[in-house]
Image: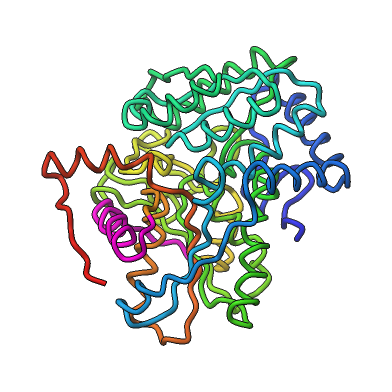
Amino acid sequence: MTANVTADGFFGEYGGQYAPPPLVPILNELAAAFEKYRNDPEFLEEYNYYVKHFSGRETPLYLCSNLTEKLGGAKIYLKREDLNHLGAHKVNNTIGQILLAKRMGKKKIIAETGAGQHGVATAATAALMGMECTIYMGAVDVERQKLNVFRMQMMGAKVVAAQSGQRTLKEAVDEALIAFVEEADTAFYLLGSAVGPHPYPLMVREFQAIVGREAKQQILEAEGRLPDYCIACVGGGSNAIGLFADFIEDKEVKLVGVEPSGRGLDYGDHAATLCLGEPGIMHGFNSYMLKDDKGEPAEVYSISAGLDYPSVGPEHAQLKDLGRAEYVYASDKEAVDTFFMLSQMEGIIPALESSHALAHAIRIAPELSKDTIIIVNLSGRGDKDVAQIEQMVANGDFELPHYKK
């Protein structure tokens, strides 16, 4: 499906290319290369080869029969992006972008990461393709995602801890962009979410749209019809737009993005951008944004390192304004409860990011009829979060619940 985006990267009034002058010709070069290769048969053949043989696609669509029975309402299916090589949807995008980088003659990959899954996927794909790799990660995220940091280093990447500001994803993006401008002749900036200046939101969407294409075909085979709901967590928005993309024209399918309400809805306690933000420009694009009292990017928080970003992909902003997608939120506690519930009911440990999406499905499923179909994008597996949750349980922040099948 062709994205509803203009040639200069606007989804309605959102998106665009609000970049410093030195970066504009670099972005335009990237946009031209993407347009050249996005439908090129040789490029697509190579991309499809690697997502199949390196990443392990296609990923299954799994009916949570135990969870569905327990809740007593709608059927809940999981799109199992956690079964990708490296444990998340991120590799769909890193393969596409690094294949593009090689065709552009670049020798080095620069990237940012929040939860570390994009960083791990970037490091692995760079190793596969023989590219030098430097990854920026907020110092706070480095501490709570130590396993992913070591995985990146194992695969030859250099990890730089961003020490400015809140020392999370926003600052990692800030510092990565500065490094990219300095090394643009030889380096390629591999952005992990559907944010940033054009062409990144479009490019990430196109490489992640494989999720929705597969899910649509799989649910038609399993149920003989389209789902009633597609639900995904939203930080920057790559996994959600990947699931939503192939269903946007299917108006009978409700699209729901779930943001983190964290510890509560006071300033600095959440990252519910689409629910509580307003339009604003940061990191080179216009979208919904959480702001402080000076109009600058707000302090944000989420228990999940991949969701604490004060803006969101511009296509999500457009879908919200059009009423095509609904955006809601789930709290830290709901996400952690869901983390344990899926682990105990289905033997699947979800990423904390994905747990937000499933929490909303669990919230609404009992009120829906048994012939209602929900697809949740299980965008990552929770191995990376186990040490963090174990420590929180040990500290008494959360109790270890027990769910009976």
Residue 342 painted magenta: yes
Q: Quadrant of the N terminus?
A: bottom right
Q: Residue at x 20, y 37 (%)?
A: 391
Which color scheme does this rendered protein use? rainbow
Q: Which residues are magenta?
A: 326-348
Q: Residue at x 42, y 33 (%)?
A: 296
Tell me: residue 101, above or below residue 243: above
333 on left or right of 225 = left
183, 116: nearer the viewer: 116
Q: Residue at x 32, y 31 (%)?
A: 144
Q: Main secondary structure of the magenta part?
A: helix
Q: Extreme top residue here?
A: 182
Tell me: residue 364, above or below residue 148: below
165 on left or right of 32 = left
Task: Please give the count of numbered marks on the rendered protein.
Answer: 0
Expressed as whole percent of the image width and height from the top left, the position of residue 149 reads 43, 26
Expressed as whole percent of the image width and height from the top left, the position of residue 355 reads 37, 55
Q: Quadrant of the C terminus?
A: bottom left
87 on left or right of 194 = left
23, 375: nearer the viewer: 375
Expressed as whole percent of the image width and height from the top left, the position of residue 115 reads 42, 37
Expressed as whole percent of the image width and height from the top left, the position of residue 242 reads 61, 55
Residue 94 painted magenta: no
- Occupied quadrant, residue 163: top left
Q: Residue at x 53, y 36 (%)?
A: 118
3 on left or right of 325 = right
